[in-house]
Structure formats: structure tokens, C-alpha cells
Amino acid sequence: MENTIFMQNSILSLLIFLPVLGAILMLPASKYLKIPNIIKYIALFTTGIQLILSAWLYINFDSTLSVMESPFTVQVNWIKHFNIEYFVGVDGLSIPMVLLTALLSFICILASWNIDKKPLGYFSLFLLLDAGMMGVFLSLDFFLFYIFWEVMLLPMYFLIGIWGGPQRHYAAIKFFLYTLFGSLFMLLAMIGLWYFTAPFNNNEGTFNLIKLIQLSPMIDSQLWGFDIQWLLWIALFIGFAIKVPVFPFHTWLPLAHVEAPTAISVILAGVLLKMGTYGLLRISYPLLPGEVVAFSYTLAILGVINILWGAMCAIAQIDLKKMVAYSSVSHMGYVLLGMSAVVSPSLAGAEAGLNGAVMQMFNHGTITAMLFLLVGVLYDQAHHRWIVYPDNYKDQELAGKLAFGGIATQMPVFSAFVALAFFAGLGLPALSGFISEALCFIGGFSAFRLVTAIGTLGILLGAVYLLRAYQRVFLGPLNDSYNKLIDINSRELATVVPIAFLVLLFGVFPKPLVDMVSSSISSLVSVIQGAM
Amino acid sequence: MNNIQSLQYFLPELLITITALFVIVFDLISQKKSNNLLVSVALFCIAWLLYQLPSNGGEIFNGMLINDKFSLYFKWIIFISTGAVILVSKYSNELDKEYKAEFDALLLFVLLGMFLMTNSIDLLMIYLSIELVSIPSYVLAGMLKNDKKSNEASLKYVIFGSFASGLMLFGLSWLYGISGSTNIYEIYKTIQLIDNPYMIYMSLMLILIGFGYKISMAPLHYWTPDVYEGSPTIVTAFFSAAPKAAGFAILIRTFFILFTSTNSLTVDALPLEGIDWFLIVAVLSAATMTIGNLLALKQDNVKRMLAYSTISHVGFMLMAFSTASIDAIVGITFYLTLYMFMNLSAFFMVIHVENNFKVKEVNQWGGIGYKTPILAAFMVLSLVSLAGLPPTSGFVGKVYLFRTLFATEKFYWLGIVGILNSVISLYYYFKIVKSMYFDESVIEKEENKPMLLYFFILLFSAQNIIFYFYWQPLYNYITKLFS
């Protein structure tokens, strides 16, 4: 019994700081223990424990309790002067993201097993990144949230910049600058929230996100002729939109995703993009419900632009990884559309939209991770990932011709998994993507008919780029230069199978996922509907 | 307080003077023996005297100087940074060993001038102390006698400096003409009664030129890059830290006492009636940080880049200064303390790299991250801190600077300018990081590891982390200076 209580109090902190400990341990271990691959084993062990802990958290998680009632919540004063707290907690919004982060981190360590260039740097930075991601999803204090948000940037910068592809330097700094640009606006909004809510809390500002839910709607003053709440919303939105990324802030994404090594692309697409939408749901939505109502139509339009723009860009790509990257832009559009449905006149529609959005965040995380992992498997053997060779290809004979073809005969198991991932990506029923996308559209349709109707075209476009790519790469007669390719090996299978299992499971039996999120979603919906 | 009584509040300054003179004499009689021990002992004694120095003396030397907590704090940070520079200077390969004594003596004279800058409350002392800092600085910039750039730096510095101090002297004489007194508290009583704001505007602007030149505020920043590039790196490191602190100390004191309605360092201030110099400072702050950052983007020379970055940091501190609140001066003092040390750490790293690898350009830094992994990691920490990102103290400092805008509900637009500038600054700071880690190693040579230099780089860089997790005591201490 005592053990359980100790576990309850410390599990969230363990989830965050265990990777840091692992990263610190690596340094002496690599120096003094002469075991080959010791660094990789430490990383695998750390993320493995993290995965077990998060599974334990999931089993003991009670979705009916609010954050303040939850036994896992920890709230300690950190800096009294500013009322900054070490305040971590978990609710229905964050638990899918925590599970996703733990799962993908573990899988990504497996997927980076063949990294031999400066492994100490790679794996310690990866674990720091892991800690930052966990911290973002578990923080309930804005200041803490911001710090974890920023702490992630530095490892990411190095991971792309040192271990990435040919254009890695440019991709790394572009990613860094874009995100920093957004997050500094977030910083201003954060300080602003502290000051503007202080008068309603005995002149004591706070960063506590739970308290701010009550305080921030009371702000009612103006600046430069705008409501301060509106300005705060815009500043926060810029910060989160760049991370999502919402059109027109998406240009960092294809570059960073393509240049990053496989595992880092998985983390970028699987977890980091979710932070944008998670931030909107965690901070902007409950704190500024009035602004959400006013902005939702714009959000729906932006979502639909994302869906269509991302899909059309994906159609135009001849690089397999770039295509997957643009498909992320498209799929995050569904999340935005689902989120905008919160203002729907029918309560069921609003809840469907938000549920769909949160589930899509999880499902896109798994599906896109699978896509990137599989592209990585192919790239490791073929050393390129062109669908069609570009016109300026170094070997002019090949320029403009199909690069692969008929891979399915050479790598049947691999091709089957790719087929599964592609079908999940285009939202085939009985796979997890279908349910969340359908819910997003149901919600969206109940709120904004025309816009959503246009958005459904995205499914069609999704089928175009995914099926066409599949046909060009895997079907048809076998390209003779690739008759030496060997099928997916057991390590690579180990990275893909768990995800494939989840994709199938949540496709036919989404109840666990729905149960996890729905009660937090209904309270969020009632906050926003209350402001209408 | 009369002169004899005042001496007890003046002991560190006296010892500095004696040491400076003795260093020169020692050089004449000692026949090429190193003066390291002498200088180290003297620095230790100065530190001890500073530690003993009371901070409740009030006006000393018949109202020429003031002895208070504010000046004592600034003396400490100025002393620590100058002391570090003096100790590290023996590792500088650029300096001619023959002139080491002169170098030390000049630095000590500048130190004396800076000490006086922190506690001058008389127009004459203000002018003299600034000149006492400036004139040895001109010589220091030209320490490399046979280097063209160093000569150019010195000459530019002289011309620009004399011009600015001439204008400032003109402004000071206006004040004297208006009030008939040179003590700033006396002057304040008179100028309150003046109903023509343009007279005060005139002298205010001229004085701002003098101080602005010292802290390299736009549009008086033109000397900075050339002087920083031409001077020996150790001198550049010095210029970028201590004189900036002294400049801010005198700027804060003079402007808060003379040109606000409250005549005090310890309360939030409003501008003197009809004279809204806050807006002027706000505009200049935006200009300073933008110019500094935009020009830094283009630089390939590390020293020049850091010189421009200094300008932009001055802009950030002016941003807080423009709100003229008690929060603002606490924030500036806090930021200045952190900034001085992260900047010195970065500059010491530049010295180390120049000594070992003989490189000046950013793109020649390739592979340093793997040749000296520990120092490079701390350099990254300093650069991250300069860019103002967590988890470093630079972030905390920057939060406090931005916070003053919200606390006083003034100049929100300046916050947005500040943010855009932070993004720009990250780009050029990370050019160095990129070179150190991403580029192929172009450096072959084994390095030697001077212990003291290592120690200072690590110490000044470690504060980035220490004050990030534990800044509260320092901040509280600074807050108490103004209560």
C-alpha cells in the first residue's frame, strides 16, 4: 500500500526525469564499462522503463477524476517570488500523448540502433529530448510548460544538424528559428497573462493553468484598440500554430522531416507536431474560451487549407519521405478541423469533433511513425528514396524515370506493412485513422457545413498520393537493380509491429482511447460552450 | 562629509591607485620579472577592502561622491570582471610581454575610473570619471603597436570619444548654467522650477549622448565594432563587460535623480514635468537592438559579431530602462550581472581558440566541438544564455526585462521588437555553434590548456545554469539595494 502511494506521487516526475538520469549515466558508462553498445542498451533500458511506467500510469489512471483530484498530481513551489510551481498532472488530454511519447521513444531507440556516428552524443541528446517532451505533456504550470517546450529545441537542433541528411544545417537552424519565433510570442503572452490576471487574484499573478482558467476570462481591458484577450490569443496561436504547423507556417516541416534521421523524423512527426495542438487544447482553449468561439471559423478554414494544401503538395512530391512529411501537414489539418467544431450548436457534434481531434493526434502519431520507419527501412538498403528520379539527377540516363518498381515481389513482408500504413494513412475503415478522421468530419460538419464539405476532398487526395506512390514503388515488374534487397529484419519488425498492432486495435476497438479522453473533453466543451 | 572623514569610504580606490603606480615602478626596477604575484595580491587586497567597505556613508568628499549600496554592488561586479581580465591577460598571445606592466596599470586606472563612475553625484566628477575611463581605454585599444587595425581602433575611439564627451560637457554646462550648482541633488531642486522644458531637453539629450556613447547606444555605436575588432581580444572582452556596467550605473543614477519627478533611486519614477524622455529612450532602445542584431548577422569575424551582439544587449537593457520603474533598474542590474559573466566567458573562449588554433573567422571554428569538448559545451551554454533561451540564466534575465513592460503597462510594442530581435540573435549565435559541431574538423593542432583560463570560462559559464535554477537569492539581494 505504501509503495503504491509513493509510486503515485513520484511517477510523473520519474517519467520526466528518468531519461535525464539515463543521459547522465551514459557518460561514465561509456568511459569505464567496456561493453559494446553500452550506450544503446542504457538508452533502451531507460525508455523501456519509461514505457512500463507509462503503462502502469495508464492502468491506474481514472478518467473520471479531474486533475486536482487525481492522485498523481504533484504541486510544489519552485520560485515563490513569481508563484512559479513545479506542478505536474495528468488528465484525459495528456495521457494519450504521454503514452504516445513513451512508446515512440522506445521504438525510436530501437530504430536508431545502427547509428554509429558519435553514439554518446546522439543517445544522450535523444533522452534529453524525451524528457522535454514528457515535461511538456505533464506540466500544468505555464512557466514549467514553457521551459520544457524550449528545452526540447536544443537537442532537436543538434540531432537534425549532426546526424541529418545533406541539407541538415539549413534544416536545423530553420526549425530552430521558426519554433523560437513562435515560442517567444508565447513568452510574451505568458508574462501578459501573469500581469493581467494579477488584479483578480489579490494582486498575485500566477502561472497555474488550473487557476488561470477562472482568472483569465475576467481580463477586460484594451490595448491598441484590441481586447487584451484577443491579443493573448493571437500571440499564443502563433506559438502553437508554428509547431502544428498551420498553413502558412508549415514551410519548416518538410525540410526538417526530410533531413532528420529516421528516428528523429518519427519523433518530429509523431510527437512534436502534437505539441502545437496539445498546447491549443491545454492552454488557449480553456483560458480564452471567448476567443475560441470568435476564432473557430478561421480555425476551420485554416484546417481545411492544411488538409488540401498538404495533400496537394504530397501529390507533387517525388521523394517518398517528403511525401510522408506533407501528408503530416494534411493530417494535422483534420485535428484543427475537429478542434474548431467545439462551437457546434449540437453538443454531440462538439464532443465528437474534439474527441476526434485528440484521437487523431494519437492515431496520426502512430500512423506517421510507421510510415517514417518504413521509409527508413527502404532507405537503409537502397540509399535513396526517390519515387521518380528528378530531372536534374546526377545520372542523366535515369532522370525522370521510375526509381523503384515491383519491390513487393522482392520484400513481401515489408510491402505488406507499407500497405497497412498507407491504408491507415488514407483512412480506410477498420484502421485507426478512419475513426478519428470520421469524428473530426462529423464534428466539423455539425458546425461548419460548407468548409467541412470542401475538406472531405482531402480524403480523396490522400488516396491519390498514397496509392499512386504504392503503385509506383511496390507494384509492377521488379526493377532489376533492386533484386538484391532483403526483406525487413527482426529489429525493424520489432519497431513496426507494436504500432501496427495499435493501428489495428484502435481501428476495430477504439473504446479504450475514447474512454481515456472523453471526460476531459466534455469538461473542456462545457467551458467553451459556456462562453458562447 | 569632509575630505578626511571621507577617506575611510575610499580605501579600495586608494589601493587601486597605489597598485597602478607601483606596478609601473616595479616594472622599472625588477628587470623583467613577472608582476603576476604582485597584481594578484593587490587584487585580493582590493577585494578584501571592498568587502569591508560600509555602504551607508552618504555623500562623501563634500558632496562630490556618494557611498551607497547601489554603487557598492556595481563596484563588485565591475571589480570581478576587471580582475578576471587582468588575471587572464597573461595568457593572451597578442599582447607584447614587454608592455604587460603598462597594460595592467592602464586597466587599473580604468578600474578606478569605473569605481568613480558608480558613485559620482557631481557634474565635475561625472565628467572626470568618464574621462578617466575613456583615456586609458584609447591606449588599451591601441596596445598592438604594429597592428594596423589596432591603431585604427585607437584613433577612431579617440575621435569618437572626444566628440561625444565634448557634447556631454556642453550638456553639463547647460545644467550648470541653469542651476548654478554642480551637485545633481542641488540641480534637481532648481530645474524643477524651470518652466521652459526645451532647456532641459537640450541638456538631457547632450548628456544622453555622452552616456550613450559609453554604453554604445545607437546611433552612437559606430565606434564599437571597429574598436572591438582592432583591439587585442582580451581588451575587447574587457570593453564589452565592465565599462558597460559602469555606464549603466551612471546613466541610472543621473537620470533617475535629475530627470524624474521623484529624485530617488528607490521609487518608481515619472518623467519630469513636460519632458517625456522615456519615449526617446524607448525609441533608441528599439533602434539599438535592431541595428546591433541586423549588423551582427553579416559578420564573419567572431569578435566583430560579439561586438554587435553587445550593442543589441544594451538595447535590451535600455528597453527596461525606458520604463524607469524600480522593477526596471532591478531588472537591468540583474541582467547586467548575468550578461557580463556570460559574455566574458564567451570572449575568454575566443581568446582560447585564438591562442591555440590561430583563427579569427566563424567558419574556421569547425570541429572545435570535438577538439575541446568541455569548453565547447560551456561555450554553447554561454551562447544559449546570450540568446536568452532556457535553461540558462540569460532567459531569466530576459524575462525580467520583458516583465517591466507589463508591470508598468508601457511600450508593449517594444516587447514585440525585442522578441523579433531575440530570434535574429539566435541565428548568429548559432552560427558559432554550427561551426563548432556541424562542420568538418579543420583543426589539427594539439592544444595547451591554461588552467586559469579554463577555470574562468567554466566558472563564468556555469553561472548560466546556477542562476537559472537558483536566481532568487541574487534577485532578492539586488532588490534590497533599492529599498
Image (cartoon, coloured by chain):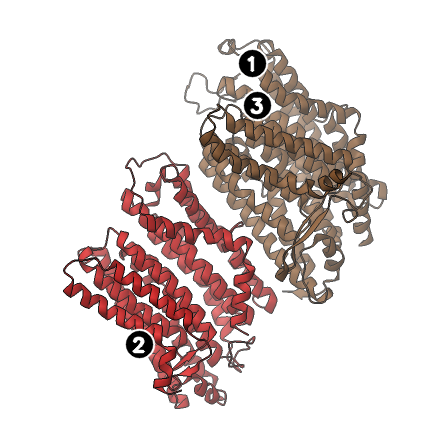
Chain colours: A brown, B red
Res. B461 in view = yes
Left or right of A210? Residue A401 is left
Decide which of tag 1 and tag 3 comes sooner along the chain.
3
- Per the image, the residue denoted by label 1 is A405
The numbered mark 2 sits on a residue in which chain? B
Disc 2 and disc 1 on one polypeptide chain: no
Query: Quadrant location of residue B228?
Result: bottom left
Label 2 or label 1, whichever lies nearer to me, is 2
Q: CA distance from mark 1 to mark 3?
A: 15 Å
Answer above or below: position of A393 versus A76.
above
Q: Compared to A485, does B468 lie above or below?
A: below
Q: What residue did someone put label 3 on?
A: A375
Q: Are marks 2 and 3 in contact (CB under 8 Å)?
A: no
Q: Secondary structure at mark 3?
A: helix
The subunit letter for the residue under badge 3 reads A
Q: Which mark is residue B166?
A: 2
